[in-house]
Image (cartoon, rainbow, N blue to C red):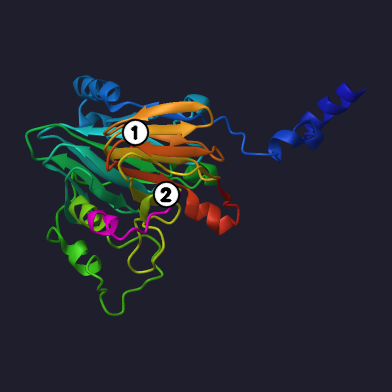
Amino acid sequence: MAELFRDRLQQQNMTPLWDVFKDLVAKEPNSGCEATLWRYCDARPAVLEAGEVISASDAERRVLILENPGLKGQSRTTTSLYAGLQLVLPGESAPAHRHSQSALRLVIEGDGGYTTVNGERVPMAPGDFIITPAGCWHDHGNDGGEPVVWLDGLDIPMIGLLDASFVEHHPDHVQSVTRPSGDALARYGSGLLPVNYDASLSSSPLFHYPYARTLDALNRLRQSGEVDPCHGLKFVFANPATGGPAIPGIEAFVQGLQANTTTEAYRATDATVFSVISGSGRMHLDDRVFEWSEHDTFVVPSWCRYQLESHNEGVLFGFSDRPLQRYLGVLREERG
Ligand code: GTQ
């Protein structure tokens, strides 16, 4: 009887809630997203090998996706975010395109790389944070003599969920450069804004946050003693025109840790992707320990309590879907 009812429901494109209620409206975050660490010393040879398998041009973007083992086959690093390691070899360029997805980049290694965003060529140096907001033309290249590798973070799963993806290929392989390098930094990165600037534009008009500046700020502030017990010295990359996040749905941050310290336990509902800019230490998550060192990437899933131990004055970078959760009123945090 019950089976016949179920069959009939299937035919009517209906399904009983009581079968799935516990999973749909879960007691706690239950996506399957797992705490995972990708060691750069293991990932790097694979990234370089990808350079022998395909060109940046043929691949469109030559990236190894950091796929969460708990979300296999879904090209996701957390439930809402995608991360990958992108390689551009000397002399190569990755073609210009634009898409609905927003991208952020953290440069990991190599000098001579650049990305061109809306007509401005942005030079890439290790530790630089660079964004490509939704809908902006971008192409990448490498004028230097060594491989350039960076971490990509995109809101691909969010845009997929919304079914709002569009991509366009530029008529030319690379877009023309129409603005001098440093233009956006001068315009928006000096505590100044052009008069009549429209602050309702949701992505940051500043798309290059050079590491030299970030590190200088961290080093000056280390002396201030304003260290959060759970976060160390943590700053978010802000849209200078609004004070909001650089990318509407993603918050990216940089975090200075003190030598030989461990942060107090903390958890939040925004699963976070961390990338180690410098230093080494351990991430304690429940009763598990993850040893991290320079350029490693690791994920702390939603609502997992963790602590960061640092052997030296380490600097971490990270990003999560915090602004989206805040907007929806679902962000939950707990200290201790
Ligand atoms: O650089 O435009 O990792 O379009 C994935 C999709 C990078 C990019 C990715 C992309 C890009």
**Is residue 72 in view from this perspective?**
no
Of pointers 2 and 1, the one earlier in the residue sequence: 2
Question: Which residue has dot 1 on it?
Answer: 281
Task: Report if residue 220 lies within the magenta region.
Answer: yes
Q: Quadrant of ligand 1?
A: top left
Question: Which residue has dot 2 on it?
Answer: 231
Q: In what element is the residue under mark 1? A: strand
Q: Position of residue 109 (x, y in %)?
A: 19, 36
Q: Position of residue 12 (x, y in %)?
A: 79, 34
Q: Position of residue 257 (x, y in %)?
A: 33, 45
**Label 2 crowding class (10 Å Cα cut-off): few <14, some 14-19, many 20+?**
some
Q: Residue at x 58, y 50 (%)?
A: 332
The amino acid pointed to by label 2 is: His
Screen quadrant of the C terminus: top right
> Disc 2 versus disc 1: distance between alpha carbons?
15 Å
| Pick the front one: 59 or 270 | 270
Screen quadrant of the N terminus: top right
The amino acid pointed to by label 1 is: Gly
**Is residue 101 in view from this perspective?**
yes
Q: In what element is the residue under mark 2? A: loop
Q: Which residues are magenta?
A: 218-229
Task: Report if residue 228 lies within the magenta region.
Answer: yes
Q: Residue at x 54, y 37 (%)?
A: 304
| Pick the front one: 72 or 253 | 253
**Label 1 crowding class (10 Å Cα cut-off): few <14, some 14-19, many 20+?**
many
Label of residue 201 in the image: none
Q: Position of residue 330 (x, y in %)?
A: 60, 52
Relative vertical location of residue 157 with respect to residue 218 in this rendering, above or below: above
- Number of callouts: 2
> Can you tell me whether the CB of the residue at mark 2 lies under 8 Å from the nearest atom of ligand 1?
no
Relative vertical location of residue 14 with respect to residue 117 in this rendering, above or below: above
Q: Quadrant of residue 40?
A: top left
